[in-house]
Image (tube, rainbow, N blue to C red):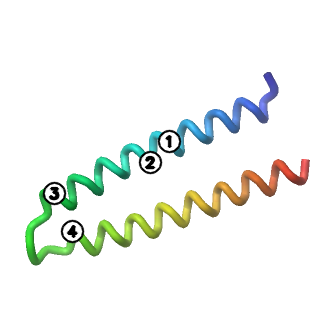
Amino acid sequence: MTITLIALVLYFAIVLAFAIFSASAIYHIWQFGYIGDLSKPVAVIYLIISAGLIIITLFLVVAQLLRG
């Protein structure tokens, strides 16, 4: 097993764990946030930022793999 394959498996495991944690956090904010507080706008901002970070890192990983 090469170091690149180990790094990819580790990267996707971390992204999967992050997605599970984020889904749980968003669910709890949506279910237990109070009317009138900023929990729902913050949840939307969190989703946008985290999705952007995952897309950027995925792009960087794929670009590095294609370069060799």
Q: CA distance from mark 4 to mark 3?
A: 10 Å
Circles 1 and 4 in contact, beta carbons < 8 Å? no
Q: CA distance from mark 2 to mark 3?
A: 18 Å
Determine which residue is flagged by label 4: 39
Q: Residue at x 29, y 70 (%)?
A: 42
**In the figure, is residue 8 to the left or right of 20?**
right
Toward the top, the furthest residue is 1
Q: Tell me the tag on residue 16.
A: 1
Residue 29 locus on image (x, y percent): 21, 59
Secondary structure under tag 2 reads helix
Q: The N terminus lies in which quarter of the figure?
A: top right
Circles 3 and 1 in contact, beta carbons < 8 Å? no
Circles 4 and 2 in contact, beta carbons < 8 Å? no
Please report whichever mark, 2 or 3, sits nearer to the chain's N-terminal start.
Answer: 2
User: Which residue type does callout 2 highlight?
Assistant: Ala
Please report whichever mark, 1 or 4, sits nearer to the chain's N-terminal start.
Answer: 1
